[in-house]
């Protein structure tokens, strides 16, 4: 197995070059700075996850396809799977933003790819080990007008990938939820990364 972490909001082709995804005023100084944005915070939990996986003997990589489209990234993962002749697990890394009262972690898989569901469920279960997370929701991402269609858009490039490629989208916590914000710093990203890594290891 090879695990690949895709910092989805960084360097999306077609988007503004400094697109960084969602943000929140984490330090309360009245402005949303670069470090308080989704694409700047997701690498901390992703790199923690990759360190735990590497220690367990699982090769890891970050998506080497910045400034590319989601389709090009998925095509590269299919090529990697063929080249390595190993299962490739792709974690689409996000952080959520909402109205401030959201108390859950969210994990999604493409509704046409039920083979990806067990890993998504395993990650969702592991998120409950975080003291900040009261609820953990695992959903099949459905087409519009369903509210999960935005996540499905991110997963769509994997719809026709071989079953040896697993794609799961994670939104471990809400930037906009006060009780979740301790996951931004200190050992927060390490705990989030460890939860994701344990779920991937449980799939071996
Ligand atoms: Zn996102």
Image (cartoon, helix red, strand yellow):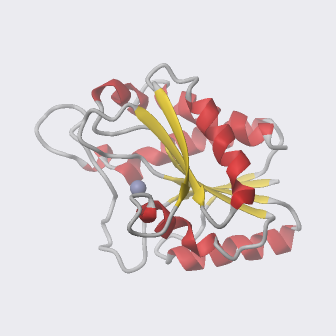
Q: Residue at x 83, y 74 (%)?
A: 82
Vertically, is 30 above or below 148?
above
Vertically, is 12 above or below 137?
below
Q: Is residue 172 visible?
A: no
> Which image quadrant: the C terminus?
top right
Q: Residue at x 39, y 33 (%)?
A: 184
Q: Position of residue 93 (x, y in %)?
A: 51, 52
Q: Report the side of 90 relative to 156 (left or right).
A: right
Q: Residue at x 36, y 39 (%)?
A: 174
Q: Report the side of 96 relative to 27 (left or right).
A: right
- Which quadrant of the picture is home to ligand 1? bottom left
Farthest residue toward the right? 85
Q: Position of residue 45 (x, y in %)?
A: 53, 40
Decide which of 7, 159 is in the foreground and name it. Answer: 159
Vertically, is 20 above or below 161?
above
| Residue 50 figure quarter | top right
């Amino acid at each position: 197995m090879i695990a690949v972490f895709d910092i989805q909001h960084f360097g999306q082709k077609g988007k503004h070059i400094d697109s960084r995804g969602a943000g929140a005023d984490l330090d309360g100084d009245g402005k949303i700075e670069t470090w308080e944005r989704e694409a700047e915070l997701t690498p901390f939990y992703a790199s923690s996850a990759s360190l735990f996986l590497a220690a367990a003997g699982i090769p890891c990589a970050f998506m080497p396809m910045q400034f590319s489209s989601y389709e090009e990234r998925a095509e590269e993962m299919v090529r990697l799977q063929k080249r390595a002749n190993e299962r490739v697990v792709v974690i689409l890394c996000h952080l959520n933003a909402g109205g401030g009262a959201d108390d859950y972690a969210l994990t999604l898989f493409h509704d046409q790819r039920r083979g990806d569901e067990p890993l998504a469920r395993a990650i969702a279960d592991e998120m409950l080990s975080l003291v900040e997370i009261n609820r953990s929701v695992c959903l099949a991402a459905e087409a519009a007008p369903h509210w999960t269609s935005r996540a499905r858009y991110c997963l769509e490039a994997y719809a026709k990938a071989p079953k040896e490629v697993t794609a799961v989208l994670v939104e471990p916590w809400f930037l906009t939820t006060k009780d979740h914000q301790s996951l931004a710093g200190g050992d927060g990203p390490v705990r989030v990364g460890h939860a994701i890594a344990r779920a991937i290891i449980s799939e071996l």
